[in-house]
Image (cartoon, rainbow, N blue to C red):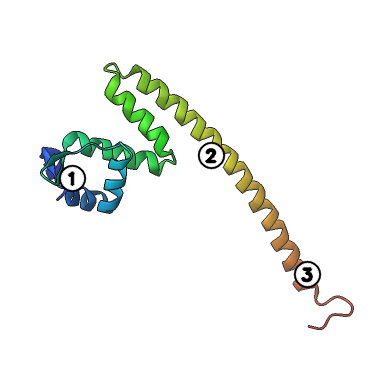
Amino acid sequence: MNKHDADKRDLFAIADLANEFGISTRAIRFYETKGLLKPDRLGSTRVFRRRDRARLILILRGKRLGFTLRDISEYLSLYDADGTRTAQVKLLIEKVDERLELLRAQMADLETTIAELTEIRQLADDRLRSGPSEGETA
């Protein structure tokens, strides 16, 4: 099923969504147990609607951006509750700012680590070029 076909459909089986997004059916069931997805049931079969597919897109995007399932759940609950989406947008801004701050701190740590490793590498290269020190054999 390509994206264009999926955009036109109203109902999806769990395998359809798993295949479309390259995730396991187990992952989808996990999101369901966490209350992030709420498919309808026909007997024992899960039936997902467009709304569930849209929520799954938001869940996967949030995970890719490093948000916790709690953050994603809070965001999705506002999506359901606030018709104006104002609270949702404010929460999104808050969570994005928090994530940016964390990533910037991690980037600074990585830059420090890279500089330290580069210096260690340079010292090791210099030592090899200068040859063995007194008492060492090559």
Observer able to see residue 22 = no
Which is more foreground, mark 3 or mark 1? Answer: 1
Say few, some or many: other residues with alpha carbon within 10 Å of mark 3 (under 14 / 14 to 19 / 20 or more): few
Residue displayed at 74% across by 67% down: 124
The residue tagged 2 is 103
Residues at marks 3 and 1 touching, judged by CB atoms closer than 8 Å: no
Q: Which mark is residue 127?
A: 3
Could you say whether the residue bearing mark 2 is in a helix, strand or loop?
Answer: helix
> What is the tally of numbered marks visible in this picture?
3
Q: Which percent across, then down, holds residue 22?
A: 27, 53
Q: Amino acid at mark 1?
A: Lys
**Sequence-first disc among 3 and 1:** 1
Which is more foreground, mark 3 or mark 2? Answer: 2
As rendered, which of 9 and 136 lies closer to the eye? 9
Question: In the rendered view, does 15 fall on the left or right side of 32?
Answer: left
Image quadrant where one finds the C terminus: bottom right
Residues at marks 3 and 2 touching, judged by CB atoms closer than 8 Å: no
Observer able to see residue 118 = yes
Question: In the rendered view, does 62 fall on the left or right side of 7?
Answer: right
Up the image or down, 94 lies above or below 17; here it is above
Up the image or down, 118 lies above or below 88; here it is below
